[in-house]
Amino acid sequence: MKYKYLLLLLFTLLTATQSMAQRRLTKSGRASADTALIVKQYADSLALLKQQLEEVRRVNDSLHSESTDGRYYRLFAPTTFYHSGVKRQLSLDGEKGDEVAEAVDKAMLQLYMKRPDLVKNNETRLKKAGTLREDVNKEVKQKVDLTRKVELQPEEPEAVPIGLVVTKPNFWKFKGEGYLQFLQNYVSDNWHKGGESNYSAVGAVTLEMNYNDKDKITFSNKLEMKLGFQTSRSDTLHKFKANNDLLRLTSKLGLQASKKWYYTLQLLAYTQFARGLKSNDEFTYSDFMSPFDLNLGVGMEYKLKALNGKLTGSLNFSPLSFNFRYVARNTLLDRYKLGGHHTKEDFGSQFTGDVKWTITDQVTWKSRLYYYTSYHRGLMEWENQFRFQVSKYISANLFLYPRFDDSGKRDDKLGYFQFQEYCSLGLNYSF
């Protein structure tokens, strides 16, 4: 009996174990079947999606590549239910519309049917909110106008290091001019008005060296040299004699006080080259260093510039001036009233004016006015030179020179006034 119950228990356990195994196998088979069905449906959806995308791409390729089309925005915007797809499917007229709009509606309809859970909004609600565009089924093209042509920028050369050389500015200026002119006059012996033939020549050189630092200080130096000779048949003692003779140095140191005024220290020194003679007269009236005059004055100078730069020059006033005179020849000591001495000094005041007026391109007037007084004697010289430029190297000069000097002997006709004049034609050169 005991074995009978034991066998019955074993049979019951075997039966339960078999049932559980069959139940497990059934469940495993069902799981495999469900997995295969899901995989098949996913593959079918991918194939359908690929077909739809190929159709959309085909329609898009038919459009202009450079245009930007706004009809595709429904595919990328948040999923919304639009009426156009349903109306197109339920339409009975069968009319074909825009290919792109039709393809988009078809793709959206497939999405509504496969995934309705993704639809979060609808066209009616968007219209009430006022956020739906009405031109979504129209092709939108961008129009670009070329308003400005941008020129190509030149390539900049590479910077090459160079050595920088800084030179000190040169404040000195040098200039000069000179001329050599002749005059010939022939008169026959039986000329009804008389007279005599003569020849004359005159040469002059003027050199200037000026300093100007463009700030306060100026230093000007001018050296004037002039010498002229003449011959005449009536003079039996001299083959030729000097009629123009000058050696003069003018130096001026200036310190600017205002725009046109300068404090100045002026040095003026002058004498002559050769002996001064008269026709048929052996007496020597002047000679080198006989006399020699040196004048040193302190004052102010005014820079003159007018008539659009055609009239230029300077006016120098020296209320305090020292004058020194030296005469080397003993025979001339009494003539220049030195009282038997070779030197004489005195103090006084002086004025010097130098102007140049370019009247025309061919006519120029240069004038120098000098006046000195020791309050016991006075000296005034007014030199005027008119130049007529014939060509680049040929010119004619007219020289007028009135002079007043009360330190010499008084003339019965002119008193203390003296006068010299000459006219010449010849060569000139400036540098």
Image: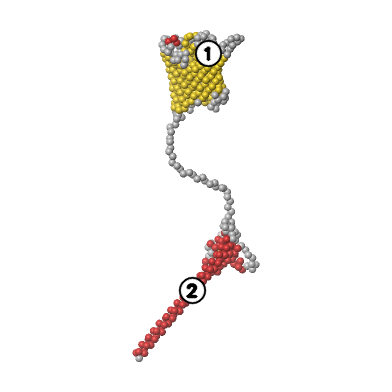
The colour scheme of the drawn protein is secondary structure
Q: Secondary structure at mark 1?
A: strand
- Residue 349, above or below 57: above
Select label 2 or label 1 by which is in front.
1
Q: Quadrant of residue 324?
A: top left
Q: What kind of residue is marked 2?
A: Ala
Q: Secondary structure at mark 2?
A: helix
x, y percent for residue 360: 57, 25
Task: Report if residue 246 is visible in the image.
Answer: yes
Using a 10 Å C-alpha cutoff, classify the residue at mark 2 as few (fewer than 14 neighbours), some (14 to 19) or many (20 or more). few
Q: Which residue is mark 1?
A: 231
Q: Which residue is mark 2?
A: 36
Quadrant that contains the N terminus: bottom left
x, y percent for residue 288: 45, 15
Q: Quadrant of residue 141?
A: bottom right
Using a 10 Å C-alpha cutoff, classify the residue at mark 1 as few (fewer than 14 neighbours), some (14 to 19) or many (20 or more). some
- Residue 319, above or below 97: above
What residue is drawn where x is 57% and y is 48%? 147
What residue is drawn where x is 55% and y is 65%? 53
Q: What kind of residue is marked 1?
A: Thr
